[in-house]
Image: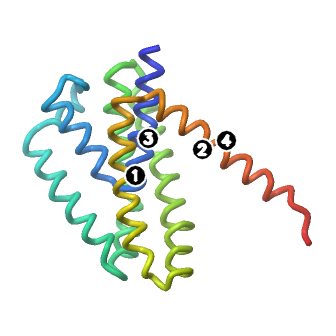
Amino acid sequence: MEMLLGIFSAFGLSASAGLNAYIPLLVVGVLAHYTDLIELQKPWDTLSNPWILILLGVLLIIEMLADKIPAVNHINDAIQTFVRPAAGAIAFAASANVITDMHPAVALACGLLVAGGVHATKALAVRPAVTATTGGTGNVPVSILEDIVSTVVSFLSILLPIFVGTLLVVLLALLIWWLWRRMNKSPA
């Protein structure tokens, strides 16, 4: 059961990295440094180093500000196309390695795919739709909502991994159902 909880936690953290690269890394680092909720193994224990926590905090502030400024947010999304999947890979590998003996390459690949998928959905589907339908005025509230969701999912992934795992399975099932209906829809 403990291994399953570690995997659920890892998937939740990497999914939240797809929305904001630095929030899950900062949450993992802060909780590992200041609490007994998570104990990171080497080399992932570097995330709990105070200097790394400060760096992650500064990067988080920069990303949050860049994501709220019109036009800059699109440049930020382009840059984050490389950063968010990498952050998701690190978050997955660090949290999966806490409880499981998953091979680091598999853990990194899983985190990369999950965070990359969430980021691609956000950057290629959700944000362009919000920009087109609201003339750009909806981008700031959506960005704030993404930051809140990323923070909540990060904490829940560590505190209530069964809830996050169940939520991720339900969302995946809904996505598959939606895609299946869309593909089987007869042309009108």
Q: How is the image coloured?
A: rainbow
The kind of residue tagged 3 is Gly
Q: Nearer the viewer, residue 62 or 132?
A: 132
Q: CA distance from mark 1 to mark 4?
A: 20 Å
Q: CA distance from mark 4 to mark 2?
A: 5 Å
Q: Residue at x 49, y 62 (%)?
A: 122
Q: Amino acid at mark 1?
A: Val
> Which of the two labelled residues, at mark 1 and mark 2, occupies the earlier sequence position?
1
Amino acid type, mark 2 = Leu
Mark positioned earlier in the residue sequence (3 or 4): 3
Which residue is the site of mark 1? 149
Give residue 82's quadrant in the image. Answer: bottom left
> What residue does disc 3 label?
111
Question: Can the viewer see residue 83?
Answer: no
- Quote the CA–CA distance across marks 1 and 2: 14 Å
Helix, strand or loop under label 3: helix
Q: Residues within 10 Å of mark 2 (few under 14, many from 20)?
A: few
Q: Position of residue 58 (x, y in %)?
A: 15, 58
Find out whether the residues at labels 4 and 2 contact each other: C-beta distance under 8 Å.
Answer: yes
Dot 4 falls on a residue whose secondary structure is helix
Measuring from the top left, give residue 28's x and y in whole percent: 26, 37
Which secondary structure, mark 2? helix
Left or right side of 65 for 115: right
Which residue, given by chain and number where applicable, does mark 4 sit on? 173
First in sequence: mark 3 vs mark 2: 3
State the separation of the CA atoms marked 3 and 2. 17 Å
